[in-house]
Image: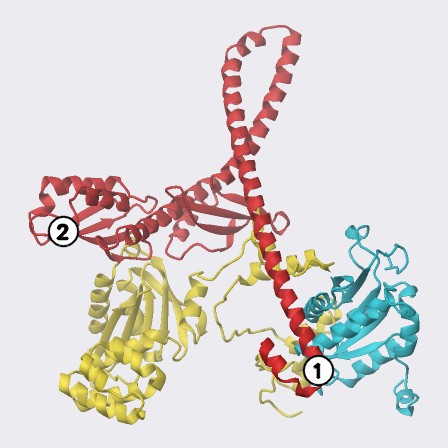
Amino acid sequence: MDDSAKQVLRRIIRRIPSNKLQITLRKWECLSKKQFRSLDFTQPKWLICENLLSLCEENDLSLKHVTELEMIFHIEHPTQGTWYVSQLIDAEEEALTSDLLNFRESFKVHLKSLISHVSVKIKKHEDDAIWIRIAWGDNFTKPNHFKPTYVVHHLQTPYVFVTGLAAKHRPLLHQALIPSAHYGSIKDVHLSGRCLTALRDLLMRRYKQVFPEKHPRLLEERSPLPSHPNIENEHAKHAENRLQMAAEAFGDGMLPKLQTAVYKLETSNLLESLKYCVSSGMASAPVTPLLSSIPRKGRNYFVITDKGPGINPTPGPNI
Amino acid sequence: MSLLKPFNKLPELNTANILLVENETQFQKKLADTIVQLENDVNVIVRLARSLPLPVEIAEKRQRIDLVVFIVHLSSEQSLLSTEVSLKQLESGYFMGKMCFLVTGARCGTVPSERLTSLKKMAASLNSPLLMTEDGTTEGVNTAAQRVLNMLKISAGLVPMATGLYLSSLIRYTVPADPDWQDQD
Amino acid sequence: MMENTIECPREGVLSHLDVLEMEALKLSRRQQLSLQQQSRVDDLRIMVEKLRAQRDQLKARVKTTMSLQQLKAVIDQGPEECDDDGEEEGCSGSMQLHLLLLKARQTQVKYLLQAHHVIGGYDVTETRRGQGVCVSIATAFEGCYLETYNLELDVTRTVRICRHNIPPFIPLEKLVQENLQTDLSNFLSTLSQHLNAFAGRRQQVRLIQAVLRGSVKVMESNALFNTVVVMCTELGENHRAVLCTLEYTDLSRYLPTKVTIESEDKALPSSPQWKENQSLLLETPAHTALQALKEKGQIA
């Protein structure tokens, strides 16, 4: 085990929380049962790390095994960093029948023809997702294993989820990805977030959407209103309608977790337009402080959070 | 528009009807659940509404309402505005001991004090009681339910020797003879 | 809970009474709740019975109307020509008959729609005051209902899909380009075929995993379930492992278009017995075929 491998391992162990360390190492399967038992997980992390290093030396493990450990941790905890989503377009016939083996070979060949120093590791997760770990180098330097890019792709779907990708590597990744997935090109879909599963569920429509139905029996069942025979809601119809409308717009049950949404209102004079909306009766008065506070606070960047009523005081000019 | 009338129907035996009006419907539900759980002797029927007037379709079926409670959240301007609008849909009979205000959030420091002041004035001008409650805790909800229930029993005529008018003349909100109040007019 | 409150009456009699009262209330509430639940279950049971009876009635009615229609058609075909060259009265009589027939046709269509719903065809609901429709397509395999998929269509100018919950690997885009604008019913039936075939393929894999657990192992399958690899053990002399690759090129079918048999024993795939098995896998759903092989004692 060379020094760089040791350094990478130290860094990975540092990033794995103590309570997840044991389970992650068990999944790794690079230590024998006896070796695994010899590790004392109540010890401080640096000590565990040193013991682990000597065990790795014993087993003659290499950088390849170390990156494997990192991948295992990332797959189990896909909330490290921000994920960006792209969509492959213009599918070819083969896109519907491509399998892991072909994809793996093709991707590696394509990428390595574009850049000489690159380390690629591809793994299939239980839910059919293909996880790709890429450590980039360039023509003169070795691949940097400290800042790997992670790519998640589900075969037969056009979506690609990427985290940790530097701008200069983006065209390389795309050039390798497009032919190996049998598509014509790729585009950004303007979706990002910390929770990979949420982004996936949102795009693949895995959350429960609600549609208008001829026999809306679901509505009656989920309506929480008649809790007691002596309580009667005068506006039950309204409440039901509102529930249905909310569910049709956003879905039902557990919804994907999304942290941010960015809207850009662009016009030659935003304030004039907003004023016109209010004065002409297009918007109901009093207008929401989200809009009316722009001139009052003298800023046009606002962050809305869960905590506290109204607008969170993000730093702005003092007026 | 059909005004809500207190005496256009005959009362039913051992039954009291209460109407909770709240724009946001959150506190309403908790309060309603607690009220029906607390009372076992009298058949209490709780009606929930977002605002007045009530829908006309079930006007025939609806029993006479003995007490109207307006729930006002001081944290929301809309809540106060909606209450003001709804008040106009009550016949004057209700203002003689058959309605009250239930206020939440009065202890919260960030709430503009003008809202409470204007609500107090409203209550005083209508000679009606104004109860302060805590909607965040179970205890607060229990206390509110207990108080409302006691008023309901009286206004429904289920307590001998007491009437809603009598009770309300005792507990109604009056403008304090404080010079500050005059200034704020 | 009760014991705890009884043990500590230090806080005064009134508060103790208060606590006792709350406990009594809680207890009575719990009893009420369980009573309510029981009665709700009973109600639902009765409802199920009622609905079943209604369904049977509807089925019976559809059947009788259909057979009546057929009878009528047979009767009408003969004498109609004679009627035409008859007198004036005959003409008005045929008009009336025509009207009756139209009415009958209308009722028939209504019943057909109902029956269509009962058997799991697609349902169409009007949305947004006639500006859109929502189509639900139910999927089923071997008499078992599976997922229902929905499409909300905007029909104001050109037909357009506003939203849907069809999985991303179904080639919806291609189907839309083919005939969403030109032939809606064709579009829906093709889509329904695709969805049913997908659900059917997935169900076969699930059934193999559930029913043939221990003897057949699903080695690989993909999101669209159009390539499925299963492994089983041949019950010959050598107990060789056999790999069957099922490929479904036609995505609107739940039967494979190509079956490949592989084994360490190179002669095995070309043996007459396995040739036969191969064609069985091409013609019958995978779980039934494999089950049959197991019963015949060809695989473990």
Chain A, which colour? yellow
Q: Does residue C174 appear left or right of residue A182 in this picture?
A: right
> Tag on residue C251?
none
Q: Quadrant of the C terminus of chain B?
A: bottom right
* Percent of width and height locating residue C130: 62, 47
Chain B, which colour? cyan
Q: How is the image coloured?
A: by chain
Front in this rendered view, residue C255 or A267: C255
Q: Does residue A279 appear left or right of residue B66 in this picture?
A: left
| Residue appearing at x 57%, y 40% in the figure | C50
Mark 2 belongs to which subunit?
Answer: C
**What type is the residue that disc 2 sits on?**
Glu
Q: Is residue B127 visible?
A: no
Chain C, which colour? red
Asked which secondary structure carries label 1, the reply is helix
Asked which secondary structure carries label 2, the reply is strand
Mark 2 lies on residue:
C262
Q: Give the vertical position of B23 relative to C72 (above or below).
A: below
Mark 1 lies on residue:
C15
Front in this rendered view, residue C199 or C58: C58
Front in this rendered view, residue B185 or B74: B74
Q: Give the vertical position of A42 relative to C118 (above or below).
A: below
